[in-house]
Amino acid sequence: MAEVIANGVRLHVQRLESRAGASADSPIVVMVHGMVMDNISSFYFSLGTSLADAGCDVICYDLRGHGRSERTRGGYRLADSMADLAGLLDVLGVDRPVHVVGNSYGATLALAFGLEFTARVASLTLIEPPFLIEGLGKEMARSLSQVLVAMNDDEVEQWLANGAGRAVSRTARAAQRLLSETTIATDMLATPPFSAEALAALRIPVLAVYGENSDIIGQAAGLAALVPDCSLIVLEQHTHMVLREATAYLRTLLNWWLFDRCTPPPPYVRENDRSFATPAWVTQMVPPPDLNAGRRPAVG
């Protein structure tokens, strides 16, 4: 299955089953990627196939406007994304609770979906979710402004044209079109904040994963404090890019979460001594450094 019409939108979908075939009680896992500079591939290759091999029925899809899904002019509010996901589950005939795994904006969407469609969700795995009780829309707009600043920088444009590689350049060009040809920026600004009361009443088990060096690590404690059944994992010396930086551990962690949650979580052991840090230009919202300096001839 490659494309379906859900909530009136054409969505690109890939469903991964265990090599032994999905059984009636196999966990159904829905994976929701991040915003703008992301698509189905980030989950498909990192965690999707691993979970399918572990016995899960895995659903990966491109969000509206991303990857191979339809790029509509409007409809990028959080409520629209939730309606797209609910429609997708309906079209696929999923009639039992699913385990939703989200990354970045996809994690924010997953949490909102769990609050709105509680009966349809068995558990939530939130990887680096932007989470605020106040000002969430402004935070989403801030993230988009960072992308816009980067996209409009002359050095980045030269890098995309001459040195970024086909895959990165293709993803960046798609992001440029999404930002310039749709209402996603204004729709994100309208994202409502989470309700402390609703979060306190949530009875879905939640696994939240943050990088210690993430630019949004300050939001982790608030989420864990409000959600009654929340397991918070903070990975030392990692950033907002946890999905890429600690893929092997996330595979182990998700297997524990879905199949062996009654035991303590697996300990995290870094695969190497590399330390990750969020670049200053991300937190300061300034254009990135000269990406082409390395291939320019020396002056003089």
Image: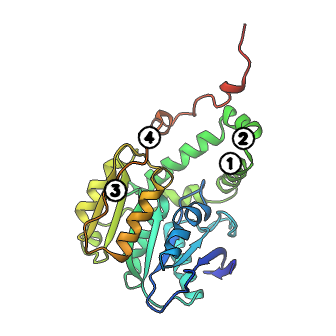
Circles 2 and 3: CB atoms closer than 8 Å = no
- Marked residue nearer the N-terminal end (1 or 4): 1
Query: In the shown orientation, is residue 4 left or right of residue 117?
Result: right
The residue positioned 37% from the left and 42% from the top of the image is 237
Say if 289 sits above or below 15 in the image.
above
Q: Nearer the viewer, residue 114 or 45?
A: 45
- Whole-Å distance between the Cαs marked 4 and 3? 29 Å
Badge 1 marks a residue whose secondary structure is helix
Mark toward the viewer: 1 or 4? 4
- Whole-Å distance between the Cαs marked 2 and 1? 8 Å
Give, as a three-letter code, the residue at label 2.
Leu
**Residue pointed to by mark 1:** 168
- Whole-Å distance between the Cαs marked 2 and 4? 24 Å
Circles 2 and 1: CB atoms closer than 8 Å = yes
- Marked residue nearer the N-terminal end (2 or 4): 2
Tell me if residue 103 can be seen: yes
The residue positioned 58% from the left and 77% from the top of the image is 16
Circles 1 and 4: CB atoms closer than 8 Å = no
The residue positioned 54% from the left and 72% from the top of the image is 80
**Residue pointed to by mark 4:** 276
- The percent coordinates of residue 233 (x first, y second) are 31, 57
The extreme top residue here reads 300
**Residue pointed to by mark 3:** 134
- Whole-Å distance between the Cαs marked 2 and 3? 36 Å
The label shown at residue 160 is 2
The residue positioned 41% from the left and 39% from the top of the image is 273
Give, as a three-letter code, the residue at label 1.
Val
